[in-house]
Image (cartoon, helix red, strand yellow):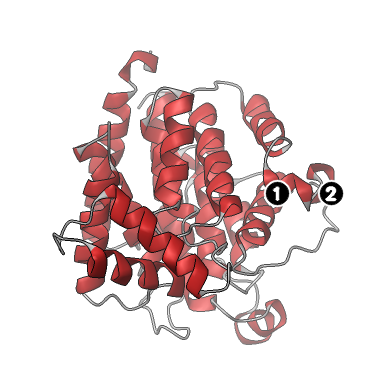
């Protein structure tokens, strides 16, 4: 396995592993987790969704939908992604975020082809959702799902623009889109950077010029005594994930720290897993975690990683 392939696989599997590890702890407080489970480092299952150990949630399922749409139609992936969102929602998944659910339903309602809303339908639907929610569509539900954008596209501008467009399919808010762009560009740069020190530096470089910097200071996030807010607000979630990555020294420690924050544990851990996987690589993911994922999802993750590796083959040594 080349180093590029290792980091691409690390990032995409990292999203799924973080999601599965955090799912049983979603909406619990950090203190509640400590009292009930101690410090979680295993796939325990349970929680409000009553997940099985290793079961993923909508975070991974929507990430895979995005990835498949990009592979099918990389030059204009929104319709292909949207078709998969509609199919996935119709399958009645165990959990769907409110903003995503509202935008998907609206896109179907206004589309001439109910199974295949157009790019314009998605933008109109998410704008309607934003208005109906009083301008509060800056949740984290589009952030983790844009990880594959940074893994697949060779050109940084393509990653930047595509991430923003994918976010706005459901989350019309400007900050949500820009944080997705920051996340994708971080991953886009990390997977081709041979120096681990410079991969950490990429986080700082990108973070300083994006909206989350309006509320958080990157040096503050790098301090052990910083107290993250593990909420569903995209800025809080991104900051919490960055803190977990910047204050640990391994994939396992970063993701474990994320899930034990509680709150929106599965999504924050999925975001963290994408970053930590790109930094440390697939081989750093504990096998006891990766092997707990359902075989169906392991196969899909493998195939999508192969597609991203092929798309970036000019960087493979």
* Distance Cα–Cα, label 2 vs label 1: 12 Å
Q: Is residue 84 left or right of residue 285?
A: left
Can the viewer see residue 147 in this picture? Answer: no
Crowding at dot 1, Cα within 10 Å, few <14 / some 14-19 / many 20+, comes out as many
Q: Which circle's residue, 2 or 1, is located before the other in the chain?
A: 1
Q: From this view, report whether residue 37 is shown above or below residue 282.
A: below
Which quadrant of the figure contains the N terminus? Answer: top left
Quadrant including the C terminus = top left
What is the total number of numbered labels drawn onto the structure image?
2
Please give the label number shown on residue 220.
2
Pinpoint residue 251: horizontal percent, then vertical percent. Answer: 57, 48
Residue shown at the point (29%, 64%) measured from the top left: 107
User: Which x, y percent locates residue 218?
Assistant: 78, 43
Q: What element does badge 1 sit on?
A: helix
Which is nearer the eye, 209 or 145? 209
Q: Nearer the viewer, residue 195 or 100?
A: 100
Q: Nearer the viewer, mark 2 or mark 1?
A: 1
């Amino acid at each position: 396995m080349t180093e590029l392939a290792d980091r691409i696989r690390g990032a995409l599997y990292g999203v799924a592993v973080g999601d599965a590890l955090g799912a049983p702890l979603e909406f619990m407080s950090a203190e509640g987790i400590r009292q009930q489970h101690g410090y979680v480092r295993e796939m325990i299952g349970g929680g409000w969704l009553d997940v099985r150990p290793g079961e993923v949630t909508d975070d991974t399922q929507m990430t895979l939908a995005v990835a498949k749409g990009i592979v099918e139609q990389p030059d204009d992936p929104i319709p292909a992604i949207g078709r998969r969102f509609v199919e996935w929602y119709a399958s009645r998944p165990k959990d769907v975020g409110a903003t995503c659910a509202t935008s998907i339903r609206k896109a179907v309602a206004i589309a001439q082809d109910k199974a295949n809303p157009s790019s314009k339908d998605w933008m109109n639907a998410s704008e309607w959702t934003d208005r109906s929610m009083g301008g509060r569509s800056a949740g984290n539900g589009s952030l983790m799902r844009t990880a594959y954008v940074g893994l697949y596209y060779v050109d940084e501008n393509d990653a930047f623009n595509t991430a923003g467009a994918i976010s706005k399919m459901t989350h019309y808010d400007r900050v949500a889109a820009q944080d997705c762009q920051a996340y994708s560009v971080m991953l886009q740069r990390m997977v081709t950077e041979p120096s681990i020190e410079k991969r950490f530096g990429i986080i700082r470089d990108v973070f300083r010029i994006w909206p989350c910097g309006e509320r958080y200071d990157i040096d503050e996030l790098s301090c052990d005594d910083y107290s993250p807010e593990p909420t569903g607000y995209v800025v809080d979630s991104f900051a919490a994930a960055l803190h977990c990555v910047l204050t640990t020294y391994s994939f396992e420690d970063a993701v474990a720290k994320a899930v034990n924050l509680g709150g929106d544990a599965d999504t924050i851990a999925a975001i963290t897993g994408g970053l930590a996987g790109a930094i440390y690589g697939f081989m750093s993911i504990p096998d006891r975690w990766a092997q707990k994922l359902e075989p169906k999802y392991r196969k899909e993750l493998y195939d999508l990683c192969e597609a991203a590796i092929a798309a970036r083959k000019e960087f493979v040594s």
